[in-house]
Image (cartoon, rainbow, N blue to C red):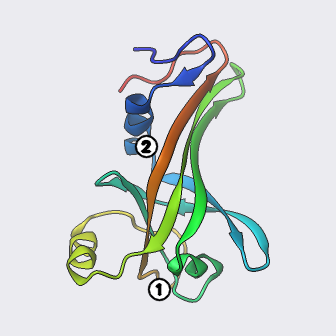
Amino acid sequence: MLTTSGNGSIDRQRCIELLLGVQIGRIAWRAADGIHILPVTYIWYQETVVFRTSPYGVLSELVHEADVAFEIDHVDERTRSGWSVVVRGRARATAEPEELRRLWRLDDPVPWAAGTRNLFIQITPSQITGRRVGPDPLPES
């Protein structure tokens, strides 16, 4: 089912379905040394984006609340079509013991990067938007 308007925007519910169907996204934020955009493996969990990172890498700056943008997308170069979903919101480290216990019980997000990745970061959305380009419809939910 195609869930776009005439301008190519994707409705919120379909954006969430797409967030549930993808494992890799990119997070963008203003770090101490400038703007960064990095890929992360993630899950959509209780209306938030959750990923694990190292407590010593650049993403660990998000232990302090920060405004972020998170994007997933799909591009088909052959048909010149695709879609993207952007989540804008606040990122913060998860420190509440009971919430950490729940997160550790989940199968995902399993980071692809090597090393210890035991810092959970959650993005609470303030806005979720999506856009489709090209002639092909979105994948079925």
Residue that lies at the very extreme toward the bottom in this rendered image: 56
Q: Residue at x 38, y 64 (%)?
A: 109
Residue that badge 2 annotates: 19
Q: Position of residue 32 (x, y in %)?
A: 74, 80
How far across and how far down the image is residue 20, in percent?
A: 37, 43
Q: What residue is disc 1 on?
A: 116
Q: Sequence order check: which comes first, mark 2 or mark 1?
A: 2
Residue found at x 25% / y 65%: 106
**Image quarter hosting the C terminus:** top left
Which is closer to the viewer, label 2 or label 1? 2
Secondary structure under badge 1?
Answer: loop
The image quadrant that residue 34 belongs to is bottom right
Residue type at mark 2? Leu
Q: Classify 10 Å Cα crowding around label 1: few (below 14), some (14-19), many (20 and above).
A: few
Three-letter code, disc 1: Thr
Work out whether 79 lies above or below 58. above
Q: CA distance from mark 2 to mark 1?
A: 25 Å
Residue depicted at 39% across the width and 14% down the height: 1
Viewer-nearest residue: 81 or 126:
126
Query: Which x, y percent locates residue 111?
Result: 47, 69
Observer-nearest of 61 and 136: 61
Secondary structure at badge 2 equals helix
